[in-house]
Every structure is written in structure tokens, then in C-alpha cells.
Image: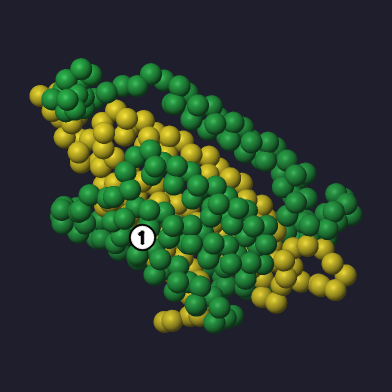
């Protein structure tokens, strides 16, 4: 059953689920953002490990190398990293505004305040 | 095709992930998230993705950590102790099922580093063979990023612009208070 060629993918799935668990279960908004970051890094790692070629080297043309890893996933993931930091900045700005408005960054306390306003 | 360095780095990453879940000190959690990024940058270098590695080290471990620390200084750096056991159990079940489904999905995938995988036989050979002559620089990742997929990169800068405008608008808006009225601080009857 155990195939060492799939070990990378399995660990990456486990890391991804660590991030997902943090996003689902943790009530603290900053913790949720950190969990989302872990999830994003795991997805990036998944793509990069698919681009690896056995015995290959980094895709920079040189006389002394024949086999290169696949450069296409690298390019796509560069874009993903930069977009991730843009969404992160926006999420953190929202958290600062939520703290100003509700004086808390815990999800359940915000829900309570909202319910109190309606009732 | 799995080297010992992969195993070590992945075990470190998993340990840090679990530690981030368990820690209630947000400052420590943010620092661990920075270490997580740096370790994954090391792993990207091992997997030949040097451009991704230095972007991750600069953006993931540098700018992201800085932004999070700035947010901590404006909010609070302590997480409330968790009380909701039921929610944690539901989360664990959901995550286990999703993870099992994803791992089942990987069984059909080409093995790590397999040169015969379909991903290496369509666009990649063209880029690897022709880009040094066509674009004139040895780094193939840069050639694709700035030339073949130039529109993609242009769209990416638009995303950053949109995020920057959004952040500025959020901070420019006048403050809104939704706290309970009895908790509101009213000037005049202050600390006395």
C-alpha cells in the first residue's frame, strides 16, 4: 500500500487539512488567516512537487545540464504567492476595522453582539 | 525518489502546523507561521523551484509576517480559550473525511519526480528548448513570467492594485461602533 512516490502528496494533504481545521474550528480571526496561509502554502507545494523531474535541476539554461524540472508550475505558483499576500493584506485590514467596531476579534463574541442588536 | 531531507522538512512543517493550532499566544503563532514559510522555501529549493523559494522567503516569511505583526499591535495578541468541544469534533470529522478523499485522489497520480508524467510533455519541452533563444535570457521561469504569460503577470499587478485601493478605502472610512452601549467610553465621565 505504501508507495514512497506518493509520500510528498500525502504529507501535503495532511498540511492542507491542518490549515483547513484552523479555518473551520478556531474562532479567532487572526488564527483563521494564519490557517488560510498554511492552506495556500500547501497548495503551492503540491503544484511545485508535481513539476519536479527526477535527476533534473532548476530551470535555468546552462551548458552543463540536460534535464530540467518543469518551469510552468513554478510560474503559476509565483503568481499565486503574490495574490495570496494581496488577499492577506485585505483580510488583515478588515480584521483591524472589525476590532475597531466590535472591540473583539473572536467570532462568537461578534455573533453575540450582532444578536443583541437585533433582539 | 524521496530523500531524507524531504522527510525531515515535512515532519518539521507538520509539527509547526499542529503547534500553530494549539498555541493561544498569537504572537508565537505568527512567528511560527513565518518559520513555516521559511521551511517551505527550503523545500521549494530542494524541489528545484528556486524562483518560488525566494519569492516565498521574501513575501511569505517577510511581508506577511510584518503585516500580521502590525495587525497584532492594533488588535490583541491573545486568543480566547476554546470552549466549544462540539465544533472542534465536527471540524475534525470534516477535515478527516476531506483529507481521506484527497489522499485517495492522489493514488492515481504520477509518482513524484516521474519524467514520463503528462505534465512534462506538452508545454514544458517547448519552453525549456526554445525560450533561451527566443527571449534571450537563461532563466526559463522569468521568460515565461514576463513574456509568454505576460498578460497573467499584468493581471496579477492589477490584483495588487485592487487590494491596495481596498485597504486604503477601509482605513479611510469613518469609525463605526457596534459595541454594547454600556461598554462605550463616554468622554467627560472618564477615569475621574
Q: Quadrant of residue B157?
A: top right
Query: Which residue appears at 37% of the width and 35% of the height?
Result: A96
Q: Quadrant of the C terminus of chain A?
A: top left
Q: Position of residue B53 (x, y in %)?
A: 62, 60
- Looking at this rendering, what residue extends furthest in the front direction? B192
Query: Which residue appears at 28% of the width and 56% of the height?
Result: B24
Label 1 CA crowd tier, 10 Å (few <14, some 14–19, many 20+): many
User: What kind of colouring is applied to the model shown?
Assistant: by chain
Against B146, residue A43 (above or below) is below
Query: Which residue appears at 49% of the width and 50% of the height?
Result: B65
Q: Quadrant of residue B139?
A: bottom right
Q: Which chain is green?
A: B
Against B98, residue A6 (above or below) is below
Name the foreground residue: A103 vs B123.
A103
Q: Position of residue B166 (x, y in %)?
A: 49, 28
Tally of marks: 1
Query: Which residue appears at 20% of the width and 54% of the height?
Result: B82
Q: Position of residue B189 (x, y in %)?
A: 16, 20
Q: From the viewer's perspective, is A108 left or right of B154?
A: left
Q: Chain of mark 1?
A: B
Q: Which chain is yellow?
A: A
Q: From the viewer's perspective, is B48 left or right of B128?
A: left
Q: From the viewer's perspective, is B9 left or right of B123?
A: left
Q: Quadrant of the N terminus of chain A?
A: bottom left
Q: Is residue B104 visible?
A: no
Name the residue tied to disc 1. B20
Against B4, residue B191 (above or below) is above
Q: Is residue B71 visible?
A: yes
Q: Position of residue B70 (x, y in %)?
A: 45, 42
Name the foreground residue: B125 vs B171.
B171
Q: Secondary structure at mark 1?
A: helix
Amino acid at each position: 500500500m505504501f508507495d514512497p512516490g506518493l509520500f510528498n502528496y500525502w504529507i501535503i494533504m495532511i498540511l492542507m487539512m491542518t490549515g483547513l481545521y484552523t479555518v473551520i474550528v478556531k474562532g479567532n480571526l487572526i488564527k483563521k488567516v494564519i490557517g488560510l496561509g498554511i492552506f495556500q502554502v500547501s497548495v503551492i507545494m503540491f503544484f511545485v512537487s508535481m513539476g519536479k523531474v527526477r535527476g533534473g535541476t532548476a530551470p535555468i539554461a546552462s551548458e552543463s545540464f540536460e534535464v530540467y524540472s518543469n518551469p510552468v508550475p513554478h510560474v503559476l505558483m509565483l503568481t499565486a504567492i503574490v495574490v495570496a499576500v494581496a488577499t492577506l493584506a485585505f483580510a488583515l485590514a478588515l480584521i483591524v476595522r472589525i476590532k475597531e467596531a466590535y472591540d473583539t476579534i473572536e467570532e462568537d463574541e461578534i455573533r453575540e453582539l450582532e444578536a443583541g442588536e437585533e433582539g | 525518489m524521496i530523500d531524507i531531507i524531504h522527510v525531515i522538512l515535512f515532519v518539521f512543517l507538520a509539527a509547526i502546523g499542529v503547534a500553530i493550532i494549539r498555541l493561544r499566544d498569537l504572537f508565537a503563532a505568527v512567528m511560527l507561521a513565518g518559520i513555516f514559510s521559511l521551511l517551505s522555501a527550503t523545500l521549494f529549493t530542494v524541489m528545484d523551484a528556486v524562483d518560488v523559494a525566494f519569492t516565498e522567503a521574501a513575501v511569505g516569511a517577510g511581508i506577511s509576517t510584518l503585516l500580521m505583526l502590525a495587525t497584532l499591535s492594533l488588535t490583541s495578541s491573545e486568543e480566547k480559550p476554546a470552549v466549544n468541544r462540539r465544533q472542534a469534533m465536527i471540524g475534525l470529522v470534516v477535515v478527516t473525511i476531506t483529507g481521506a478523499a484527497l489522499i485517495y485522489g492522489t493514488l492515481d497520480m504520477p509518482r513524484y519526480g516521474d519524467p514520463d508524467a503528462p505534465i512534462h510533455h506538452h508545454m514544458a519541452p517547448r519552453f525549456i528548448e526554445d525560450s533561451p533563444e527566443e527571449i534571450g535570457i537563461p532563466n526559463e521561469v522569468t521568460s515565461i513570467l514576463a513574456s509568454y504569460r505576460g498578460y497573467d503577470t499584468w493581471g496579477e499587478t492589477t490584483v495588487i492594485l485592487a487590494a491596495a485601493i481596498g485597504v486604503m478605502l477601509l482605513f479611510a472610512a469613518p469609525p463605526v461602533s457596534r459595541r454594547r452601549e454600556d461598554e462605550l467610553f463616554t468622554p467627560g465621565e472618564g477615569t475621574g
